Image (spheres, rainbow, N blue to C red):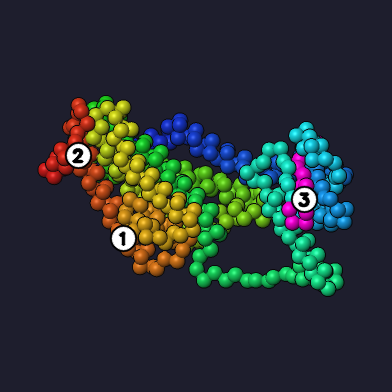
Amino acid sequence: MKQFGKILKFELKYYFKNKIFVGVTIFLVLAIAAVMFFPRITALFETDDTSDTSTELSVMLVKADEPAQADMVKQAFATAFTDYDVQITDESNDTIKDKITSGDAECAFVMTDATAYTYYVNNLSMYDMNTEIANEVLQQIYQMNAMIGGGMTAEQATNVMNIQITSEVESLGKNQMENYFYTYIMIMALYMVILLYGQMVATNVATEKSSRAMEVLITSAKPTSMMFGKVLASCLAGFIQLVAVFGSALIFYNLNKSYWGDNMIIDSIFNIPPELLVYMLVFFILGFLIYAFMFGAVGSTASKLEDINTSVMPITMLFIIAFFVVMFSMSSGDVDNTIMVVCSYIPFTSPMSMFTRIAMSTVPWYEIAISIAILVGSTVGIGVLSAKIYRVGVLMYGTTPKISNIIKAVWKA
């Protein structure tokens, strides 16, 4: 235990003295501060100018053969398209096109009859929803005219068209939309931390081996103490960095909460339920440890520092596959599909898969308990196995050893 404590303390000092580690942490805190203070800063530059800004609106031209139809469409479009200055025109189509291409107008609707039109726009944006809005407006106009023609008064037709539907939604399980944002953030944070710190663990081990420092260390400390000390130090360093980043984000958010208003994304991130936060920490820490142990073991088998990227590729690919399975399931909305359920019990994929299911679905308590038990047992087992590989890897120099040779050496150790 004394050896483990010394190694843990030494490795932590390495991270806290590392300029890159400290620099990245400070940069992330400053970036979060810039984001959280952005509404407050922009509010300082806002003016109280209440002058008429209608001339600043983009022009939308509307052309119809019948004046009565043109007036009705203009009135309806002006209500629906509040970001445009809707204007009636009787100019030719070529003139309308010239105005759009020259920038005098942004778009135009040329009506061919009551239910058909041509929409002119210079550059059609992938987010342009004008035609969808126009279709709905024109459909309502047509239906209202049909009802008036059938004997209804204009007031009766308006009441029918403007009927309000009231509804209530009572979720008996989880609200996926509400939990989506912090689930996504946790998955992304785990993804970045594992790849970043896992690579650092493997690099540190390979550096010690290439400098022959590992041979000295292995004779004065147990391999288990060295492996667990290195991995837990990286875990603590990463956890402290995340606490610094997200802790500062929480502080900055509370300082600027009134400026953010009712932003659904921001509110959902900073109002995470306590029980979900506990599950997040459990799966985050265990997921990090199991991959860090594997990265450390692989790093000890690399003969040269240049071989690290090739050596850790299988582990990286395994984690990336797990990441994409979770992301595709989240995007589809079905987080309880067969693949996700199976991945919830595989220790290499359960940190992301089971947490996603817990956050966005209803998972029985015994499934959660089984998943955590498997993950804990696997983490300890892989940690011990990694320590043995670490001890054997010290003596393996030259070419990268084959897996079969490593297994034989570990079995004899």
Disc 2 versus disc 3: nearer the observer: 3
User: Could you tell me residue 56's position as x and y percent?
Assistant: 82, 41
As measured in the structure, the alpha-carbon distance from the residue carrying label 1 to the one carrying label 3 is: 68 Å
Q: What residue sits 52% from the left and 58% below the top? A: 179
User: Is tag 1's residue or tag 3's residue first in the polypeptide sequence?
Assistant: 3
Query: Badge 3: few (under 14), some or many (20 or more) residues near its Cα, within 10 Å?
Result: few
**Circle 3: residue type:** Thr
Q: Which residue is mark 3?
A: 112
Q: Which residue is mark 1?
A: 373
Q: Element at badge 1?
A: helix
* 195 in magenta: no
Region in magenta: 103-116
Q: What residue sits 57% from the left and 50% below the top? A: 250
Q: Element at badge 3?
A: strand
Q: Report the side of 129 relative to 88 (left or right).
A: left
User: Could you tell me residue 264's position as x and y percent?
Assistant: 62, 55
Query: Badge 1: few (under 14), some or many (20 or more) residues near its Cα, within 10 Å?
Result: some
The disc placed on residue 403 is: 2
User: Is tag 1's residue or tag 2's residue first in the polypeptide sequence?
Assistant: 1
Q: Report the side of 271 relative to 207 (left or right).
A: right
